[in-house]
Amino acid sequence: MVQLALLITNKHRLLSVAAILDVFESVNRFYESNGESRFFDIKLFTLATESPGVMTFGNHQLQPVRMAEQQDLILIPAFSATDTNEAVQENRSLIPWLQQQYQKGAEIASFCTGAFLLAATGLLNGKSATTHVNATANFAAAFPAVRLYGDAIVTDEAGIYTSGGATSSFHLMLHLIKLYCGREVTIHIAKLFAIDMDREQQAYFGTFQPPQNHGDNLVTMAQKRIEDAYQEVSTIEEMIQDIPASRRNVVRRFKLATGVTPIEYLQKTRIEAAKKLLEQTDQSVLEVMLNSGYNDLKAFRQLFKKSAGMTPKSYREKFNAGRMESVGYARK
């Protein structure tokens, strides 16, 4: 029986823990329904120091991690906290245990922003990883030694696994089930939870959320200039017009505060505007292009696909509000 440890971390996301438990318990029920023994021995571990049996989580007893024996597979759920650095700090005492478990042969998987804790162990250094698409900038800044693939749904390298955000977690669970249990069980679970197995990337779920609380008033002025006039401005000189600083100084401070250059910021702002038009209006792709500040249809399509992971037409088909109301829903 595979020893599976689910960490109930401080500031864990309840939905992440519940989904993991539901999926792996369903795997066990599949084996039991076929007259076989449960495949996973699922145990829940916490940082708390109380004795075993004192705490419970659903039908499971929570055990102090200090009492955990060697595990085969360790799962780190997503964090509920928006401040992932703070969440990592509150779970730092798990780091030596994770390192020791991996060195002794355990495999480790993190879901969504749980990758921040996994990366803090150093075990991801030089390896591939992903996380929630909106957390990639913070992750890259905090862990430059990790090879981050922000658009990836799942990564798998040297017995360490990570997943993208939210529902991408189900794809990592399917990947693990396939590795441990085989294709038949994987397909059963995919059908049971209605999981599309062919998702290739998560870029189209991303939203450009530039930092606004960096404290640099000059950069804030430049950001506002871009956001208010993204349809008209196209050069750095136009972006920093009326800002009391040299071009070189503005560009340096802008990159430091936001993580991107002013030109990159302009492109991301325009693409975000195009996404909203595709989601909320019936404008043609040509109209969307013009209203988001572009004038070359071929270049617009290329830039949009590079940023969103799909063409403008495909994006509209997937996310347009009017289309979502008419497809896949039964209403009385």
Image (cartoon, rainbow, N blue to C red):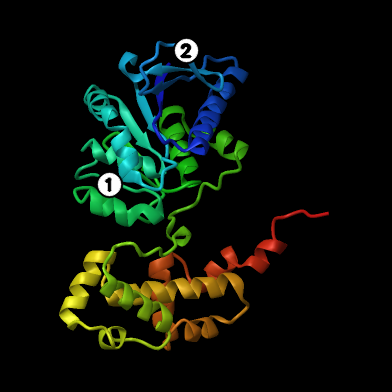
- Give the residue furthest to the right: 332
Disc 2 or 1, which lies upstream in sequence?
Answer: 2
Q: Amino acid at mark 1?
A: Ser
Q: Residue at x 23, y 35 (%)?
A: 121
Indicate the quadrant containing the C terminus: top left, top right, bottom left or bottom right.
Answer: bottom right
Crowdedness near tag 2: few (<14), some (14–19) or many (≥20) residues, C-alpha within 10 Å: few
Percent x, y of residue 285: 54, 80
Q: Nearer the viewer, residue 221 or 321?
A: 221
Vertical relation: 264 (above or below) 20: below
Q: Residue at x 24, y 71 (%)?
A: 254
Q: Which residue is mark 2?
A: 54
Crowdedness near tag 1: few (<14), some (14–19) or many (≥20) residues, C-alpha within 10 Å: many
Residue 122: quadrant of the picture: top left
Indicate the quadrant containing the N terminus: top left, top right, bottom left or bottom right.
Answer: top left
Q: Amino acid at mark 2?
A: Val
Percent x, y of residue 53: 47, 11
Distance, label 2 to label 1, CA atoms, is: 39 Å
Residue 319: quadrant of the picture: bottom right
Residue 315 relative to residue 33: left or right: left
Q: Which residue is mark 1?
A: 128
Q: Secondary structure at mark 1?
A: strand
Residue 192 relative to residue 209: left or right: right
Residue 69 relative to residue 203: left or right: left
Q: Nearer the viewer, residue 159 or 307?
A: 307
Q: Secondary structure at mark 2?
A: loop
Percent x, y of residue 19: 53, 35
